[in-house]
Image (cartoon, grey):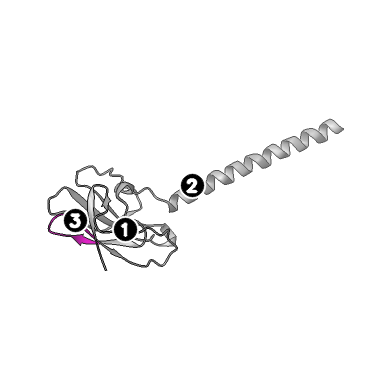
Amino acid sequence: MKKWILTLVVIILFGIAGIGIKINSDFDKFSKAFHSEHSLKESSFILISESTSPNLKYRYYEYQFDNGGFGHSRVFWSVVDNNEDKEQDLIKGLIPDGYKIKGWTNNDKLIIEKWEPYYKIEKTELKSGTEINGVIITLTE
């Protein structure tokens, strides 16, 4: 009798562990939907604007992601090399929270403006002359 009870308890524990693993993997898929890859090929990628530097060497993108029934994500800005690679990894040139791209100067510097987002951010201090992904920035007020 004790063997049957012990066997039943072990089977139930394995079942609970299996269900826990399944739930955890489903949460991983759910969280990945909200932390989309920063790529031009991402299915939920929405391009707001883009601009090429005057020397045609760099391009910046202003974009967000479509989170389905939850609406759109916050806006992101990224500056990358200007090439035809549509698999571009935009995370390399991602502008830190609290700053947004305003445009280009005539001498190929990126104009960045400080702004106060509605969500909690990690404070990053940028200064004019800082380089992001090979591009020198100019900070405006």
The residue under label 2 is 29
What amino acid does circle 2 point to? Lys
| Label 2 Cα crowd, 10 Å radius (few <14 / some 14-19 / many 20+) | few
Location of mark 3 (residue): 109
* Mark 1 nearby-residue class (10 Å; few <14, some 14–19, many ≥20): some
Q: Do the residues labelled 3 and 2 touch (CB within 8 Å)?
A: no
Q: How far apart are marks 1 and 2 (CA)?
A: 34 Å
**Tag on residue 139?**
none
Q: Give the magenta part as a residue range.
A: 102-111
Q: How far apart are marks 3 and 2 (CA)?
A: 39 Å
Q: Are the two marked residues, 3 and 1, in contact with CB atoms closer than 8 angstroms?
A: no
Where disc 3 sits, the SS reads loop
Nearer to us in this view, 20 or 113 = 113
Mark 2 residue element: helix
Quarter of the image containing the N terminus? top right
Sequence-wise, which precedes: disc 3 or disc 2? 2
Which of the 4 image quadrants contains residue 14?
top right
Q: Residue at x 24, y 55 (%)?
A: 129
